Image (tube, helix red, strand yellow):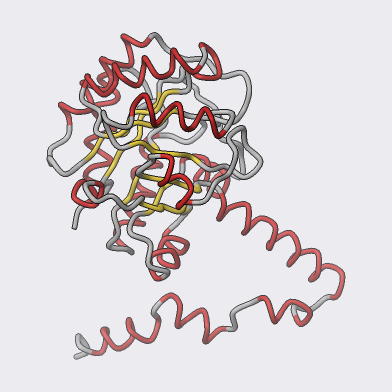
Amino acid sequence: MDLRQRLAEPRIVLAPGVCDALTAAIAAAAGFEALYVSGAAIAYTRLGRPDLGLVAMTEVADHVARIADRVDVPLIVDADTGYGNALNVQRTVRALERAGAAMIQLEDQTFPKRCGHLDGKAVIPAAEMVGKIRAAADARQNAATLILARTDAAAIEGLDAALDRARAYAEAGADALFVEAPRTRADLARVTAALGTLRPLLANMVEGGKTPVLSAPELEAIGFRIVIFPGGIVRALARTAREFYASLAATGTTEPFRDRMLDLAGLNDLIGTPAMLALGKRYDA
């Protein structure tokens, strides 16, 4: 089942954030029906830097291709601003579609963008973003590829303006809508009341961000169709890594941490080493 078909069902799609092929494989094994390839998570893990538009489009496309090669789960891919104007957006859509994206997210921030839950954002004119959405819809080669339009205008122009932008983006050809960083549960409900009959709506849950973190069932009850937890895995990994290195530095051994680690056999089982070795034997001389 492709993502468009899945979104026709009433159940909400819970898409955890992944940062690489390893976390994607682990998430897919846990049974998730879609995965979110977070631009912030790529910046955090590939560059060790914040989500400030530092990652290039080609880096994202290469990264998505590696993930798509590892898992057979629809990928919702964060394409930031499309990395330029409408013509850049078309190249971005073609590249990410070839790489394996099932849904491509585009936002209306100025370039370079910044994390949607940071202050100091700015947005382009709504008419310019409408053109970029139309360009994205025209560029895709597969009708199953979905365009997700995100607006960051709530923080700059207010929620009413963000809802107006989302309506215009839907009319321009967006298949799903994402109003970033509503401040309260009541604001989340306003989003679904205003837009829920137009397109499937995505909610972004960021631990410590500007939006209250609700569960998937709570968001489904409000009227959302997709929920992402984009950076949760990186925050979990970062805390674990910090504790691991502190323990190793203090003790000179990994023994105190062994109960929180996979051993070699456990990791090989997770990444499929036995199965790949068995497959290789089929091709031995």
The residue shown at (40%, 46%) is 220
Which quadrant of the view contains residue 77? top left
Taking the image as shown, residue 63 lies to the left or right of residue 182, namely: left
**Outermost residue toward the right in this view:** 250
Pick the residue in front: 57 or 184: 184
Quadrant in which the C terminus is drawn:
bottom left
The residue shown at (42%, 23%) is 151
The residue shown at (55%, 19%) is 155
Residue 63, position as x, y percentages in the image: 39, 49
Pick the residue in front: 142 or 30: 30
Residue 117, position as x, y percentages in the image: 59, 31
Taking the image as shown, residue 123 lies to the left or right of residue 208, namely: left
Q: Is residue 45 above or below residue 194?
A: below
Count the marks. Answer: 0
Q: Is residue 187 above or below residue 241?
A: above
Residue 247, position as x, y percentages in the image: 81, 69
Taking the image as shown, residue 59 lies to the left or right of residue 200, namely: right
Which quadrant of the view contains residue 76? top left
Q: Is residue 212 above or below residue 11?
A: above
The residue shown at (12%, 38%) is 141
Pick the residue in front: 82 or 105: 105
Taking the image as shown, residue 249 lies to the left or right of residue 16, namely: right
Residue 62, position as x, y percentages in the image: 35, 47
Which quadrant of the view contains residue 174? top left
Quadrant in which the N terminus is drawn:
bottom left
